[in-house]
Image: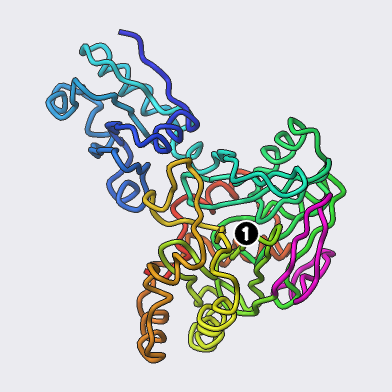
């Protein structure tokens, strides 16, 4: 039987549609335990490739005949060979094109909503890493918020929409992935904006995001709320788009809150984080739709594939927003932290412009899940 091919876009659509998929992951156990392709109805078995060099007979009883099966490895080659052996044994399987490297880099654009005066808002879901970028479109112009380093996705989408990218924003200095902000601004001639408190060591020019400022994209207003508090950073800044959407960066997620330790300042920044979440956000309209820069688990995806919920819903359901005792909050935020993101110090230095790794090194630096939230 022929070996089929499944792309990152194909798997993403299965996640959005909550379809079932059986995944045979042939990477080493440690890599599998650290990071894998997850979906609400996905099942996994991990058998390292080196255990299958003499054949797949011993695992045939682990592969269901009534479910679609995908073979996954790091870069593609091993999964192709294992899929071919399973196919020769009579199973109908697919291999994953590009492997986990492709999964790390795939961006799926999803329409969030129409805006007033004919504009549109899109969310770019980096499904393998849980990163979220945004494009605001209005009257032939576009703004990009928290772009990843795969800038061609944004420029191509803008071209398809017939719009010109005029502004690029980073809500903060990212520590878990490499920003495409400066590159995108250079490629398009757009203005690049970032929080000045996060830019004290950067080597490039930028426009400062300051409290009370407003940037207009076509007929759409982006109101800047400089909530100087740690998502990762002291400069973390929120935007309100079209008076309806609250871009929270890494301060607030759907199911958690931002971790304050990636610059070694957890104890110093906890009070700022609490003030932003419990006072500054509390003063905003509960009808604002929170659109964060990351998600942690697939359950945070809505039925249409977007990630977002009203601020009122989060104040009622997000545990991180419902800890009345300040000491308990401090304990949770400083002690209940996942491992540091891979290469996060190098990523921060790259995003400051201090170092310029080669493309392949940048890929390796980003491999793995995002770890931006308090557990």
What element does badge 1 sit on?
A: strand
Provide residue 123's location: percent of width, then percent of height. Answer: 60, 47
Give the position of the N terminus as an image quadrant. top left
Above or below, 173 relative to 186? below
The residue depicted at 50 percent of the width and 77 percent of the height is: 261
Give the position of the C terminus as an image quadrant. bottom left
Q: Foreground: 73 or 107?
A: 107
Q: Foreground: 142 or 147?
A: 142
Could you say which quadrant of the image residue 350 lies in?
A: bottom right
Give the magenta range. Answer: 198-225
The residue depicted at 60 percent of the width and 41 percent of the height is: 111
Could you say which quadrant of the image residue 337 lies in?
A: bottom left
Residue for badge 1: 245
Provide residue 134's location: percent of width, then percent of height. Answer: 65, 50
Could you say which quadrant of the image residue 14 lies in?
A: top left
364 inside magenta stretch:
no
Q: Foreground: 159 or 247?
A: 247
Provide residue 268's location: percent of width, then percent of height. Answer: 54, 88
- Residue located farthest toward the right when viewing the structure as drawn: 189
């Amino acid at each position: 039987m022929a070996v089929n091919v499944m792309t990152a876009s194909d798997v993403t659509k299965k996640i959005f549609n909550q379809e079932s998929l059986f995944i045979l992951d042939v990477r080493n156990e440690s890599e599998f335990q650290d990071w894998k392709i997850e979906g609400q109805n996905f099942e996994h078995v991990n058998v390292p490739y080196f255990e299958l060099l003499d054949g797949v007979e011993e695992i045939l009883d682990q592969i269901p005949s009534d479910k679609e099966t995908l073979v996954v490895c790091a870069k593609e080659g091993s999964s192709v060979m294992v899929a071919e052996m399973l196919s020769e044994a009579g199973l109908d399987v697919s291999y994953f094109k590009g492997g986990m490297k492709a999964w790390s880099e795939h961006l799926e654009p999803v329409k969030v909503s129409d805006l007033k005066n004919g504009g549109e808002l899109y969310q770019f879901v980096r499904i393998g890493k849980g990163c979220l970028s945004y494009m605001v479109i209005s009257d032939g112009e576009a703004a990009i918020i928290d772009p990843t380093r795969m800038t061609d996705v944004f420029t191509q989408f803008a071209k398809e929409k017939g719009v010109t990218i005029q502004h690029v924003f980073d809500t903060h200095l990212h520590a878990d992935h490499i920003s495409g902000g400066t590159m995108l601004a250079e490629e398009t001639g757009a203005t690049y904006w970032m929080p000045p408190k996060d830019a004290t060591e950067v080597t490039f020019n930028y426009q400062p995001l300051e409290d009370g400022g407003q940037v207009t994209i076509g007929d759409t207003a982006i109101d800047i709320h400089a909530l100087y508090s740690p998502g990762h950073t002291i400069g973390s800044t929120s935007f309100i788009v079209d008076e309806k959407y609250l871009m929270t960066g890494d301060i607030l997620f759907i199911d958690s809150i931002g971790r304050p330790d990636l610059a070694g300042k957890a104890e110093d920044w906890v009070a700022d984080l609490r003030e932003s979440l419990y006072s500054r956000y509390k003063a905003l309209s509960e009808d604002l739709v929170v659109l964060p820069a990351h998600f942690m688990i697939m359950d945070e995806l809505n039925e249409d594939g977007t990630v977002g919920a009203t601020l009122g819903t989060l104040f009622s359901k997000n545990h991180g927003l419902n800890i009345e005792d300040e000491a308990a909050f401090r304990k949770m935020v400083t002690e209940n932290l996942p491992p540091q993101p891979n290469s996060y110090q190098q990523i921060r230095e790259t995003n400051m412009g201090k170092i310029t790794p080669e493309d392949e090194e940048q890929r390796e630096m980003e491999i793995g899940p995002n770890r931006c939230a308090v557990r």
